[in-house]
Amino acid sequence: MLNLLRRFIIGLIAFVVGLVFFVWLLWMPSATEPGYSYELSWGSKGEAAGQFNDPTSIAVTDTEVYVSDARNQRIQVFDYGGKFIRQFGNKGDAPGELGRPMSLSIANNELYVADYFNDRIQVFDAQGRFVRKWGGPLGMNIFGPFNGWFATVTSIIVGKQGNILVADFYNNRVQKFSAEGKFLSSFGEKGTGDGQFQKAIAVAEGADGSVFVADFLNNRIQKWKSKQKT
């Protein structure tokens, strides 16, 4: 009688465990179903419309995809299906010309471009017409970096308050501007300690206003807390 009871209890436990495992399998997300499915791709290496030579950044609106075609010194615009719509920019350092566009950000129907070799930020309207610019190659000098100038810009974002954050790569800092390009503040310096950078290459902003910076040669991410209320 005791052995029969033991067998019943063991069988009941095995049934419950099996049932729990079965339910878990039903609810567990499948490793082969990540929530996205491949749809399409477009582009190949080249200089023709719809081709790329080092696409480095993407920014999107409700209907269009902007791509920084870095070594072709231009911005290309596509619809969501990859159909080429227009392009703007060409090699040079005059207003509206580009010296390898690296990073893009869109806000208020304006496109902000980190103009890598020209050490500046350029702003275009949605159709690609030049609007304004700021910065220049005087960021690195024997007297220390000048505010509002750059030594290679690698990343740009429009923050939640409408201000612009720029990763100033060789100056090992992040600079903050108004949407019109007025210098507001900066943080960071060269080094390996806390709050120092060895090439600030990318910047992002959190929901609470904190700023995250990819510290390239220090192989780390640094977080900076906002002093402003959000």
Image (cartoon, rainbow, N blue to C red):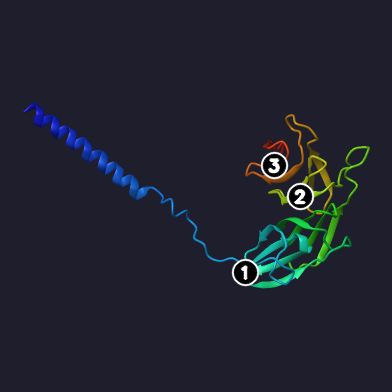
Question: Label 2 sits on what residue type?
Answer: Thr
- Please state the horizontal and vertical placement of residue 14, each as a whole percent of the image: 22, 37
Residue 50, numbered circle: none
Please tell me which of labels 2 and 1 falls first in the chain. 1
- Placement of 199 over or under 95, stated as above or below: above
Q: Which residue is mark 1?
A: 82
- Outermost residue on the front side: it is 45
Where is residue 3? Give x, y as percent.
10, 28
* Image location (x, y in percent) of residue 111: 74, 60
Q: CA distance from mark 2 to mark 1?
A: 26 Å
- Does residue 82 sit above or below 68 in this rendering? below
Q: Amino acid at mark 1?
A: Gly
- How many residues crowd mark 1 within 10 Å: few (<14), some (14–19), many (20+)? some
Q: Secondary structure at mark 1?
A: loop
The quadrant in which the N terminus is found is: top left
The answer to which of 23 and 224 lies nearer the viewer is 23
19 relative to 103 in the view: left or right? left
Q: Amino acid at mark 3?
A: Ala
Instruction: Note whether residue 125 is visible.
Output: no
Q: Residue furthest top?
A: 2
Residue 72 in sight in this render: yes
For label 2, count other residues whose C-alpha is less than 10 Å away and answer few (under 14), some (14-19) or many (20+).
many
The quadrant in which the C terminus is found is top right
Q: Of helix, strand and loop, which one carries label 3?
A: strand
Kindly identify the residue that appears in the image at 41 percent across and 50 percent down: 29
Q: Are marks 1 and 3 in contact (CB under 8 Å)?
A: no
| First in residue order: circle 1 vs circle 3 | 1
The residue pinned by badge 2 equals 154
- The x, y position of residue 81, in whole percent, is 59, 70
Asked whether, in this view, residue 62 is left or right of residue 31, the answer is: right
Q: Which residue is mark 3?
A: 214
Among numbered discs 3 and 2, the one appearing first in the sequence? 2
